[in-house]
Image (cartoon, grey):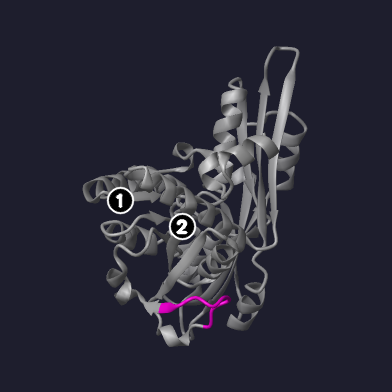
């Protein structure tokens, strides 16, 4: 059995609990939280501990699944945890992945541990499709669209702003851009031309809404490069929206094999629950990390470095017979 620990119990942590509970080859040693352990009511019956007790479990956990946000949690905590544990996370600030990778690769190699980063559907599964389709159709263009749906990372970034009580962000593909790709026009699209970001924000009493709107719209790596709409609503309205965290997206590769023959490949996802699906991807890659570490692998890995067969609970003989 692969013994896992779950760090954090927000929407993603809850989804990881559900995914681990379905994995017959995994056992949850515990959920580790910054909140009072007795205050958590888990979706499944796993033990709950304070994050301060985590060090006591060194040597008893094969992989930690980190369920913090990319804005501040993961950049500030993963390296320290990696000194004692193997980890897998869903860090999704695309522009900062090389820097994050380099830092964790150094820490992991110094401490003989293994980390898989940026695991989810984008970055993650969409990254695999961009690489794969680019290799198959080298004479072509990639297009990636997200939504319409709730971005966990962008919503978390909004909630980190001083004076924000609660917030949620929807990523919306622009129809004209999406249709121009599907029609085979091979357009040159800027970041701003592809997506709209719409935010719904509840603020604390007395806060400057104009200043908060400015901070959101000018936030680098999240909103600065997009057309962004900020709506100020009540906390109750945001909580109602948070009951349904759907999302999805598309990866396209448009390319030619000859001047006469063009090809368009589309990979899409439609998700009722963004955190639950992301958690399922994270859990599959936790299995891979445990297997690779058992083989002596250390350092930092991405989806490009991990063989697909390591994600499956089934043996290779089964995969060749039933899936190949």
For the point 72% across and 24% down, the residue is 263
Relative to 264, is 100 above or below?
below
The C terminus, quarter of image: top right
Relative to 201, is 123 above or below?
above
Is 310 covered by the magenta stretch? no
| Residue 311 image point, x, y percent | 53, 47
Question: Which residue is nearer to you in this view: 165 or 211?
Answer: 165
For the point 47% across and 59% down, the residue is 1
> Callout 1: helix, strand or loop?
loop
Question: Over which residues does the magenta segment extend?
Answer: 41-48
The residue labelled by disc 2 is 218
Question: Which residue is nearer to you in this view: 305 or 145?
Answer: 305
| Residue 312 image point, x, y percent | 57, 47
Q: Is residue 198 visible?
A: no
Label 2 Cα crowd, 10 Å radius (few <14 / some 14-19 / many 20+) = some
**Image-based side of 57 in relation to 126, left or right:** left
């Amino acid at each position: 059995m692969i013994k896992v620990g779950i760090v954090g119990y927000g929407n993603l942590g809850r989804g990881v609990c559900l995914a681990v509970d379905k994995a017959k080859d995994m056992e949850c040693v515990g959920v580790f939280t910054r909140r009072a352990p007795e205050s958590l009511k888990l979706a499944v019956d796993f033990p709950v501990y304070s994050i301060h007790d985590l060090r006591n479990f060194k040597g008893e956990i094969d992989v930690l699944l980190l369920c913090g946000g990319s804005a501040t949690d993961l950049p500030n905590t993963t390296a320290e945890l990696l000194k004692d544990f193997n980890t897998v996370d869903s860090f999704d600030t695309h522009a900062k992945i090389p820097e994050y990778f380099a830092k964790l690769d150094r820490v992991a190699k110094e401490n003989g541990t293994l980390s898989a980063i940026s695991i989810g559907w984008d970055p993650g599964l969409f990254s695999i499709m961009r690489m794969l389709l680019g290799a198959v159709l080298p004479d072509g263009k990639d297009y990636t669209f997200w939504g319409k749906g709730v971005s966990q990372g962008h919503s978390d970034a909004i909630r980190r702003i001083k004076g924000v009580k609660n917030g949620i962000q929807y990523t919306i593909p622009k129809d004209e851009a999406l249709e121009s790709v599907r029609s085979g026009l091979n357009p040159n699209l800027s970041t701003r031309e592809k997506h709209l970001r719409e935010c719904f924000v509840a603020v604390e009493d007395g806060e400057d809404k104009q200043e908060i709107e400015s901070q959101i719209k000018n936030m680098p790596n999240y909103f600065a490069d997009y057309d962004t709409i900020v709506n100020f609503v009540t906390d109750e309205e945001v909580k109602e929206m948070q009951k349904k965290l759907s999302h999805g997206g598309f990866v396209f590769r448009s390319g030619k094999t000859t001047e006469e023959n063009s090809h368009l490949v589309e990979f899409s996802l439609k998700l009722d629950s963004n955190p639950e699906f992301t958690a399922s991807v994270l859990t599959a890659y936790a299995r891979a990390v445990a297997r690779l570490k058992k083989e002596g692998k250390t350092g930092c890995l991405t989806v490009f470095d991990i063989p697909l067969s390591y994600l499956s609970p089934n043996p290779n003989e089964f995969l060749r017979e039933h899936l190949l």
